[in-house]
Image (cartoon, coloured by chain):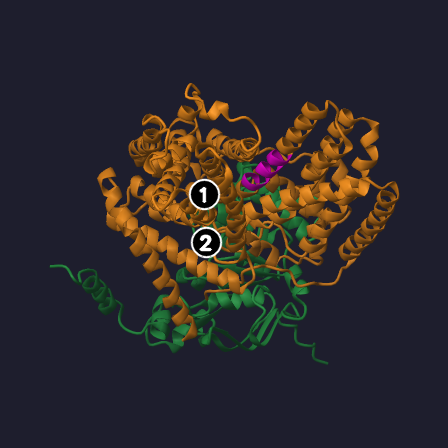
Chain colours: A orange, B green
């Protein structure tokens, strides 16, 4: 009875959201979207989301309605407070509003590439929809609307504080103008991403498209993080380039278009040229038209992407693996991880942007440090190291999930004597092929730039990285990698993890700088860290040696269902 | 002095399983001697796959006792798993692994050396006409090829007992004949086969003994000839099966389907 009551509750929520979204169906009908089918697809997605979210919450995993979303939204709200301060205090509203819409664009792009690209690109439901009489336009529209609903939450939490601050400063006319500009800004980001995707599926071969999309995702993440850095400079650097009447930038940058629409609607003087706010409407509108033209072939092109037919090669002999791992289960884990890291779509889509962001940020810090002081300081070098280093334990989280999580039956029916052995081999593979090369390359660059003077700092930072990695390994070793479902339409909190790790890196670098002021404190902290690393390494080694059966953490227990 | 009776390959003693209060298996008692090919048949939802999942160690939460190869399924799952091979009803794979990588993974999990795995994998795939695809990603295989791969992985470690859940699904005629012959040969070699299927003529021809399951209970158990003898329905397993499991005549239900299709139309 209880279960049936809950199902009704989930369906009722979905229907309520659907009622709110139903005008969208009518709005899209002139573009060739079948309203009834659009709403049916959207309802199915929402019911699946809500049901899945509830189940995942019961099982303690992350889901759209679990901690991941709440934390992400809280984070956005906190950023919104900073933006609200800018709206309230910066003299020129064009600058402060450009900052607000720039950050909004950055967050939407970041979330789109890190969380929702899978929703837009998923191909598995097309196997069900393929034979049904639903055209590509309607499928694409349902996907976009589904994604859009969650962006409303995101933009709402980020924009709430600036909305209040702007209304207090500029009067009640600000609120509707700001809401309109936020909607247009978000629509521009999403429409641009979709136009790129819909164009790509028409002109590029399947395999190139898969690789291209991955690279685009990496580039998008890096660009959005970098743009965040540059937008931050707006508060400190001269803004003539933005506010000068002769400047071309207001015509080029979409966040400025959104800012000018607000200024026009609140009748701010001097009023920006009419063309700029018109661009805020014209750009997403033009993209929507492009999408209506491109979308009919979307379904068939996406279906062709779902099948990979690349011929494989015989596996290479792995000298280092054979030296390090004498146990067959550990070798199985090593090779399994190596193959999945090279080809598993979800892992590549999520891990590579983390690596790219870490390196680009590290390079940014080094470049800015050099441009300011002309010399690479130990603190700057360490900040770069922590930034790259702190990304490493993130991979331990990323290897939990797979598109092919249902294949875990293989591990459940195999006589896996010690899951720790298998997981240990997998983790070794991850470290040898990804984490250690990243750390080593960064250390080499930092030493080359900073010279021998930064060697103790580099050593200290490496110890912190090792301790963090060991902690992550001890936590993850009971989870056989690639055995969990990462639902394509749910928030995983990955953006939160990404932002969280950047903050962690910043805190570590700050603590390092404080410790560095006292030679004694630095030495004591270093020795303590060595002891901690030794203890953690022993704990990890002991857990690998444990041959007794332990209960594996399989996440959702659905595999036994169905007679 | 009489020889002690050989240890049975599989025993189920009062096995009961419920999902959310709904009984799926209701006190199943079954003993399968070594070297027997047991056909386990029943309509959809009768509890066939649940029985198999309990026996292969995928479902631990059940009442009653179950042993496989002399080992308790709950207390000694690793000993059980080491001795069995399993072809599941639905084949989920890590699609980005190649055929060989998958078999290497399975071989290592069963404790085979890489050399032995490679030799056996190549030989088995060659016979199943999958040798040319050994380094292809699993994602590029057809349904029948995936089924062959499942079969290859299940017998790679030369198991004592083989659990086959709809093993012929998606296979072409040649492969079907080959697998049927192979199952018979396994029995001659002293292996035990637990064969779940809806394809009754295959069960009829291949299995030494047939167990019919309905709503989680065994409703018939015996060799094919004995089942036919007891039945009023006729001389085929399909007729016996329908007599034991169907709620009404097939022609009457077919007409009901036609009527349902047309409901609501003008």
Q: Is residue A349 magenta?
A: yes
Label annotation for residue B168 = 2
- Above or below, A181 against B218 in this view is above
Q: Looking at this view, name the residue that lies furthest to the bottom.
A: B1
What residue do we see at 53% from left, 40% from top? Answer: A345
- Above or below, A59 against A24 in this view is below
Q: Looking at this view, name the residue that lies furthest to the top.
A: A246
Subunit bearing disc 2: B
Q: Does the magenta stretch include residue A119?
A: no
Question: As drawn, is B64 to the left or to the right of A545?
Answer: left
Work out how far the residue at label 1 is from the one at label 2, CA to CA, in angstroms: 14 Å
Per the rendered image, the range of residues in magenta is A348-358
Q: Looking at this view, name the residue that lies furthest to the left.
A: B266
* Discs 1, 2 touching: Cβ within 8 Å: no
Displayed quadrant of residue A33:
top left
Identify the residue under disc 1.
B142
Name the dominant secondary structure of the magenta segment: helix
Q: Badge 1, how many Cα within 10 Å: few under 14, some, many 20+?
A: few
Quadrant (top left, top right, bottom left, bottom right) of the N terminus of chain A: bottom left
Question: Which one is nearer the viewer's eye here, A11 or A16?
Answer: A16
Q: Position of residue B59 (x, y in %)?
A: 56, 67
Question: As drawn, is A300 to the left or to the right of A213?
Answer: left
Q: Position of residue A561 (x, y in %)?
A: 48, 64
Q: Can residue B208 be seen in this view?
A: no
Q: Which of marks 1 and 2 is nearer the N terminus?
A: 1
Q: Where is residue A396 in the image (x, y as percent from the top left)?
A: 65, 48
Question: Which one is nearer the viewer's eye here, A102 or A501?
Answer: A102
Subunit bearing disc 1: B
Q: Is residue A190 visible?
A: yes
Q: Is mark 1 on a helix, strand or loop?
A: loop
Q: Is mark 2 on a helix, strand or loop?
A: loop
Question: Which one is nearer the viewer's eye here, A305 or B217?
Answer: A305
């Amino acid at each position: 009875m209880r279960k049936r009551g809950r199902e009704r509750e989930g369906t009722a929520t979905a229907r309520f959201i659907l009622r709110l979204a139903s005008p969208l169906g009518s709005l899209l009908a002139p573009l060739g979207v079948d309203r009834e089918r659009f709403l049916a697809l959207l309802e199915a997605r929402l019911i699946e989301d809500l049901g899945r979210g509830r189940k995942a919450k019961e099982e303690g995993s992350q889901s759209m309605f679990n901690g991941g979303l709440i934390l992400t939204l809280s984070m956005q709200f906190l950023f919104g407070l900073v933006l609200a301060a800018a709206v309230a205090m910066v003299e020129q509203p064009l600058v402060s509003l450009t900052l607000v819409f720039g950050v909004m664009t950055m967050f939407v792009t970041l979330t789109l590439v890190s969380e929702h690209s899978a929703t837009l690109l998923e191909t598995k439901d097309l196997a069900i929809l393929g034979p049904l009489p639903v055209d590509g336009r309607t499928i694409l529209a349902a996907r976009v609307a589904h994604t859009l609903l969650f962006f409303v939450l995101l933009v709402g939490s980020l924009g709430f504080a600036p909305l209040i601050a702007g209304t207090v400063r500029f009067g009640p006319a600000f609120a509707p103008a700001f809401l309109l500009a936020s909607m247009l800004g978000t629509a521009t980001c999403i429409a641009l991403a979709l136009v790129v995707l819909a164009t790509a599926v028409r002109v590029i071969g399947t395999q190139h498209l898969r690789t291209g999309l991955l690279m685009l995702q990496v580039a998008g993440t890096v660009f959005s993080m970098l743009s965040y850095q540059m937008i931050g400079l707006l508060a400190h650097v001269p803004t003539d380039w933005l506010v000068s009447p002769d400047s071309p930038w207001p015509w080029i940058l979409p966040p400025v278009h959104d800012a000018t629409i607000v200024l026009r609607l609140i009748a701010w003087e001097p009023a920006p040229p009419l063309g700029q706010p018109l661009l805020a409407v014209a750009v997403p509108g033009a993209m929507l038209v492009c999408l209506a033209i491109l979308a009919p072939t979307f379904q068939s092109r996406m279906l062709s992407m779902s099948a990979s037919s690349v011929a494989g090669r015989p596996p290479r002999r792995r000298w280092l693996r054979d030296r390090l791992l004498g146990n067959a289960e550990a070798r199985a884990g090593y090779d399994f991880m190596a193959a999945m890291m090279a080809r598993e779509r979800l892992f590549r889509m999520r891990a590579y942007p983390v690596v790219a962001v870490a390196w680009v940020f590290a390079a940014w810090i080094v470049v800015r440090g050099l441009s300011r002081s002309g010399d690479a300081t130990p603190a700057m070098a360490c900040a770069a190291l922590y930034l790259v280093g702190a990304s490493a334990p993130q991979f331990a989280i990323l290897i939990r999930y797979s598109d092919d999580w249902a294949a875990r039956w293989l591990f459940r029916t195999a006589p896996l004597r010690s899951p720790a052995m298998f997981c240990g081999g997998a983790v070794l593979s991850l470290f040898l092929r990804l984490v250690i090369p990243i750390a080593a390359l960064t250390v080499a660059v930092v030493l080359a730039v900073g010279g021998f003077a930064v060697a103790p700092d580099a050593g200290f930072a490496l110890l912190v990285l090792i301790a963090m990695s060991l902690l992550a390994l001890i936590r993850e070793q009971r989870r056989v990698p690639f055995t969990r479902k990462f639902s394509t339409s749910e928030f995983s909190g990955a953006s939160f993890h990404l932002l969280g790790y950047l903050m962690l890196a910043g805190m570590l670098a700050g603590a390092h700088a404080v410790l560095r002021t006292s030679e004694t404190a630095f030495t004591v902290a270093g020795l303590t860290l060595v002891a901690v690393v030794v203890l953690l390494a022993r704990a990890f080694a002991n857990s690998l040696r444990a041959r007794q059966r332990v209960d594996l953490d399989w996440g959702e227990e659905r595999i036994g269902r169905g007679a | 002095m009489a020889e002690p009776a050989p240890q049975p390959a599989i025993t189920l003693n009062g096995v009961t399983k419920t999902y959310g209060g709904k009984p799926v298996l209701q006190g199943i008692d079954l003993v399968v001697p070594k070297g027997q090919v047991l056909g386990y048949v029943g309509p959809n939802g009768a509890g066939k796959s649940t029985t198999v999942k309990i026996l292969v160690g995928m479902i631990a939460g059940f009442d009653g006792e179950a042993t496989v190869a002399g080992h308790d399924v709950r207390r000694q799952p690793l000993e059980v798993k080491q001795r069995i091979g399993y072809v599941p009803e639905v084949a989920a794979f890590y699609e980005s692994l190649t055929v060989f990588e998958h078999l290497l993974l399975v071989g290592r999990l069963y404790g085979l050396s890489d050399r032995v795995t490679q030799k056996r994998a190549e030989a088995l795939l060659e016979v199943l006409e999958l040798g040319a695809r050994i380094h292809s990603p699993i994602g590029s295989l057809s349904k029948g090829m995936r089924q062959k791969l499942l079969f290859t992985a299940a017998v790679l470690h030369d198991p004592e007992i083989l659990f086959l859940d709809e093993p012929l699904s998606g296979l072409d005629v040649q492969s079907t004949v080959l697998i049927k012959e192979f199952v018979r040969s396994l029995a001659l070699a002293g292996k035990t086969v637990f064969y779940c299927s809806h394809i009754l003529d295959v069960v009829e021809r291949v299995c030494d003994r047939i167990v019919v399951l309905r709503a989680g209970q065994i409703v018939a158990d015996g060799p094919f000839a004995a089942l036919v003898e007891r039945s009023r329905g006729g001389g085929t397993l399909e007729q016996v099966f329908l007599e034991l499991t169907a709620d009404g005549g097939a022609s009457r239900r077919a007409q009901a389907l036609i009527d349902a299709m047309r409901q609501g139309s003008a």
